Amino acid sequence: MACCKLGEDEKVSSEELYLKYRDYAWHRNEYVRPSNDFKAAMELAGFKTTHPHNKVIYHGIRLLTDKELGVEDDFLS
């Protein structure tokens, strides 16, 4: 996925990552895995999780910011 950065110190919430993945696949008319299947695929790919404060965090990956993607906020422009 071109919207992610991999690295030892990177992390992202599972919810945020899954929503981005779902949007990515849907806009490309691709099959959208159910969340439990997505989780299994992430684990198979080697991503570890932690569970702070009843959330799931993937380690080794994060979403790029709009600035990193070159997206400008033109709300008031």
Image (cartoon, rainbow, N blue to C red):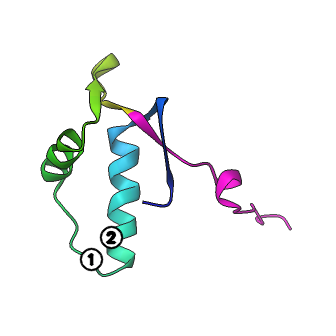
Residue beneath disc 1: 30
Write the residue at 32% across / 51% down: 18
Nearer-the-camera pick, 44 or 31: 44
- Label 2's element? helix
Write the residue at 51% across / 57% down: 3
| Residue 56 lies in quadrant | top left
- Compare marks 2 and 1 and give the one earlier in the sequence: 2
Residue beneath disc 2: 25
Q: Determine whether label 2 and label 1 are within 8 Å by CB.
A: yes
Q: Is residue 33 above or below residue 38?
A: below
Taking the view exactly as shown, the residue that stands out farthest to the bottom is: 29
Magenta highlight range: 60-77
Q: Amino acid at mark 2?
A: Ala
Nearer-the-camera pick, 21 or 15: 21
Residue 39 image position (x, y, % from top left):
19, 44
- Is 28 inside the magenta-drawn segment? no
| Residue 49 lies in quadrant | top left
Nearer-the-camera pick, 67 or 77: 67
Write the residue at 29% across / 35% down: 47
Residue 77 image position (x, y, % from top left):
86, 68
Q: Amino acid at mark 1?
A: Glu
Q: Is residue 21 left or right of 8 when viewed as pictured?
A: left
> Label 1 crowding class (10 Å Cα cut-off): few <14, some 14-19, many 20+?
few
Name the mark on residue 46: none
